[in-house]
Image: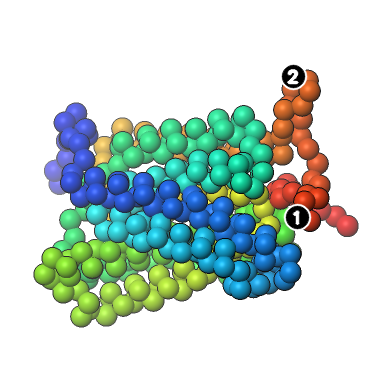
Amino acid sequence: MGTEHYSWRDTYRGMSSDNIKGLVLALSSSVFIGASFIIKKKGLKKSGVSGVRAGVGGYSYLYEPLWWVGMITMIVGEAANFAAYAFAPAILVTPLGALSIIISAVLAHIILQEKLHIFGILGCALCVVGSTTIVLHAPQEREINSVKEVWDLATEPGFLFYAALVITLVFVLVFHYIPQYGQTHIMCYIGVCSLVGSLSVMSVKAIGISLKLTLSGTNQLVYPQTWAFTVVVVLSVITQLNYLNKALDTFNTAVVSPIYYVMFTSLTILASVIMFKDWDRQSPTQIVTEMCGFVTILSGTFLLHKTKDMVDGPGVLPVRLPKHMDEEDNFGQEGIPLRRQQT
């Protein structure tokens, strides 16, 4: 069996026209999605004044117009994201969600008065640097000529094991951990969103490829595999929206966004590596560089998490504020306790 050799030109040969289209669509998607977090949060807080909050199982936000504005904004962003996956690999598209972290954090600081410490800003910067590193070393898109090829990749033993593991973990979180720790541990809600999201992105990519091939003259809508992927997307999106609403209503937006981004990105790239075998087409240097990008992103998220309640006090050292009630709107200052609080 022959050995593939990678040259400097192979590694840095530039982006194809399809990858550039995917890049532009992904950037646009991040702008809309980042803004939607804030609009939906405002709607959730407004609806919670007169109804049952989403964080404790209520659905009064469905009657709030502002929440629907946020939902429409998110749909536009997701549509752009959907189109991006049809043109570029997941390793290129998904990390660009870092831009939505910056947008949501800045808007949360300005509109929601959710303070972001200087180290939080540094954390956002690290997330962007790590994501840029990954994007610069992302592989070219795999050549696929039929949705059947995607289905064959999805039904290989490796990805079937991953999908079964994801579904098992989601059920454990939903039926065991969320009832006990959902209100105090953000990883419960975000875990469900991220795990389900990794499967939904693979299905979204399959549908995107199917539509792109159909529009180019090769009808893929006649294959049952296309509709099977569609069902997975619908069920996944409904699940993600439900638990993302709970996370936004319970915890600080400036922290929900980056943690969701890191978990969702990591699991999506893992799923893509397993299903589409992205790393099989890359050199060891590229793979190691991508891993360094992940470490940089995780470092940024750690800073955001640890400085979520910090403000600059009168002295030189920053101080951490205790959890307290916001007198203006009767909402608690959203935080992330490190462990379940005892009563």
Going by the numbered disc 1, the residue's amino acid type is Asp
* Image quadrant containing the C terminus: bottom right
Q: Residue at x 74, y 64 (%)?
A: 49
Q: Nearer the viewer, residue 10 or 111?
A: 111
Of the residues under marks 1 and 2, which one precedes in the sequence? 2
Between the residue at mark 1 and the residue at mark 2, the CA separation in whole angstroms equals 31 Å
Q: Residue at x 61, y 57 (%)?
A: 41
Look at discs 1 and 2 and give the one toward the viewer: 1
Task: Name the residue carrying label 2.
Answer: 316
Q: Position of residue 114 (x, y in %)?
A: 66, 44
Q: Nearer the viewer, residue 275 or 195?
A: 195
Task: Name the residue carrying label 1.
Answer: 329
State the residue lying farthest toward the left: 217
Is residue 261 found left or right of 220 in the rendered image? right
> Crowding at label 2, few (<14), some or many (≥20) Cα neighbours within 10 Å?
few
Q: Nearer the viewer, residue 101 or 151?
A: 101
Q: Residue at x 19, y 28 (%)?
A: 8
Contact between labelled residues 2 and 1, with CB atoms less than 8 Å apart = no
Is residue 98 found left or right of 229 in the rendered image? right
Q: Position of residue 300 (x, y in %)?
A: 54, 35
Q: Is residue 29 visible?
A: yes
Q: Quadrant of residue 48?
A: bottom right
Q: Residue at x 28, y 76 (%)?
A: 225
Going by the numbered disc 2, the residue's amino acid type is Val
Q: Position of residue 35 (x, y in %)?
A: 50, 51
